[in-house]
Image: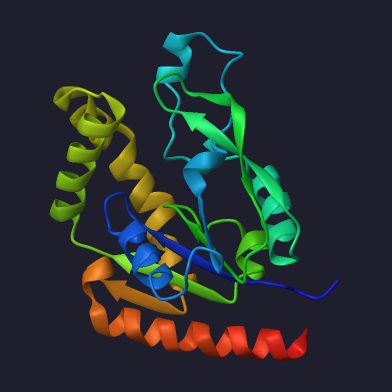
Amino acid sequence: MDKYAILIGIAGGTGSGKTSVAKAIASDFGKSEVALIEQDSYYKDLSNLTLEERVSVNFDHPDSVDYSLMKEHINSLIHGIEVNIPIYDFSTHTRKKETQSVEKHRIIILEGILALFHQDIRDMMDIKIYVDTADDIRVIRRIKRDINKRGRTFLSVIEQYYKTVRPMHIQFVEPTKKYADIIIPEGGRNKVAVDILRTKIMTLIINHKNAT
């Protein structure tokens, strides 16, 4: 089956500005053209564990991600097949009963710290992007997000950063930079890089439409 959509992978450390880049790209292409898929949706369901055990899981390690289901869904989407993506509850570390239905789109953006980690998924990508932002900026963004959006305390965020986030970034996230076609410093604020990406994406869309 021929590919219907182009797949763009956007990786980078926590708080690097990956989502900003994705939104900047999507802003010129309308909602019917772009589907944003977040790696966070594919954290493994931990309902079989106690809450105490769930909290101790290292969510910055590749083993915490259900790459099998992600691969299945991404493959379906790039061939124009609708999928039902899990909705993850970060307060309980489990998947909700509800799912998010995603129909076919011409552009699929997969965004997450380990978006470029899995080779099979990486090989399906038309463009691979790594967002490179200074550590101090990323840490501040992470603290604000986890406190405001995930109900965490300041001390718990700092403890997690030193215990798992930083070492996992060094071991697993930053090395995926070598797979990137484009490295973007400072995320969505890099207007020149985003403009170049838009032009490249438009060319890919035209080529795909002509081929189908």
Image quadrant where residue 164 sits: top left
Q: How many marks can you see?
A: 0
Decide: is 15 above or below 88. below
Q: At which x and y percent is residue 46?
A: 56, 21
Decide: is 34 above or below 47. below
Of 16 and 148, which appears nearest the observer? 148
The type of colouring in the image is: rainbow
Q: Is residue 155 left or right of residue 212?
A: left
Of 189 and 157, which appears nearest the observer? 189
Of 76 and 29, which appears nearest the observer? 29
Give the residue at x 47% y 18%.
54
Image quadrant where residue 45 sits: top right
Give the residue at x 58% y 86%.
204
Q: Is residue 145 left or right of residue 179?
A: left
Q: Is residue 45 left or right of residue 77?
A: left
Decide: is 103 above or below 179. above
Q: At which x and y percent is residue 184?
A: 31, 74
Q: Quadrant of the N terminus?
A: bottom right
Q: Quadrant of the C terminus?
A: bottom right
Q: At which x and y percent is residue 99?
A: 61, 35
Give the residue at x 31% y 61%.
20
Q: At which x and y percent is residue 61?
A: 47, 40
Give the residue at x 34% y 69%.
24
